[in-house]
Image (cartoon, grey):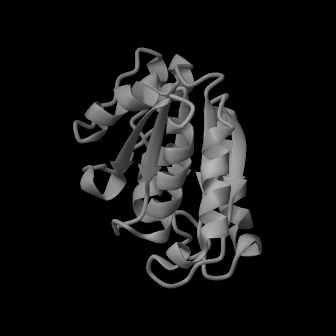
Amino acid sequence: MKILGLVGSPRKNSNTDLLVSAVLAGAAKNKHTTQKVYLYNVEIAPCVDCKACKKGDFQCVLKDGMQKLYPKIQNADVIVFGTPLYWYGPSAKMKLLLDRLRPFIASKKLKDKKAVLLVPSEEGADACNHTVGMFNMSLGYLEMTLISVLLPKATERAELKAQPDVLHQAQTIGKHIK
């Protein structure tokens, strides 16, 4: 299986990055192919609601970094979405990515694919309800299945390095991807 990890944090080695890396490491132990993309290294323009993508031929009028990211997303069997919680929602880059998944609605090229959601936050799981709901609805609309969610409490930069139990949970999620 091909597992794509999308890191929606602006910082490398952040709590989000650590979680995505742990899931991918667990998946790699089962001989899955893994790849990680830092969304803050990808130019992603906001959707302009032109509706060109609704024709079903997978066209997006915006020519940016998504042109290289679309095939990676389409070819993945499982997509790991990692985002810090910012103002009770995903990071700006992760939200831009979600908005730009619209071509997959008409094309149905993500149908039956699986997803994992990782959201470290200062306040813990209860603060993530809105974000989890947004991903549940968005992924459902794309006909994807959210197979696992991990919502650890982590405030300081790379704090999860001191929480091996949480990183073990993330790695276990990766090991159980089938």
Residue that sits furthest to the top in the current view: 57
Residue displayed at 63% across by 40% down: 175
Which quadrant of the figure contains the C terminus? top right
Q: Nearer the viewer, residue 124 or 133?
A: 124
Task: Say which residue appears at 56% left-offset and 19% top-offset.
Answer: 108
Q: What's the residue at 33%, 65% (across, down)?
A: 12
Is 125 placed left or right of 81 in the picture?
right
Residue at 54%, 21% in the rendered image: 106
In which quadrant of the rendered view does residue 118 lie?
Answer: bottom right
Residue 167 in sight here: yes
Residue 121: x and y in percent read 60, 75
Pick out the residue farthest to the bottom: 156
Depth check, front residue: 41 or 88: 41
* Quarter holding residue 61: top left
Image position, residue 164 (x, y; %): 60, 69
> In the visual, does 70 lie left or right of 166?
left
Q: Position of residue 52 (x, y in %)?
A: 39, 27
Q: Nearer the viewer, residue 87 or 122?
A: 122
Residue 148, horizontal then vertical, whole percent: 71, 46
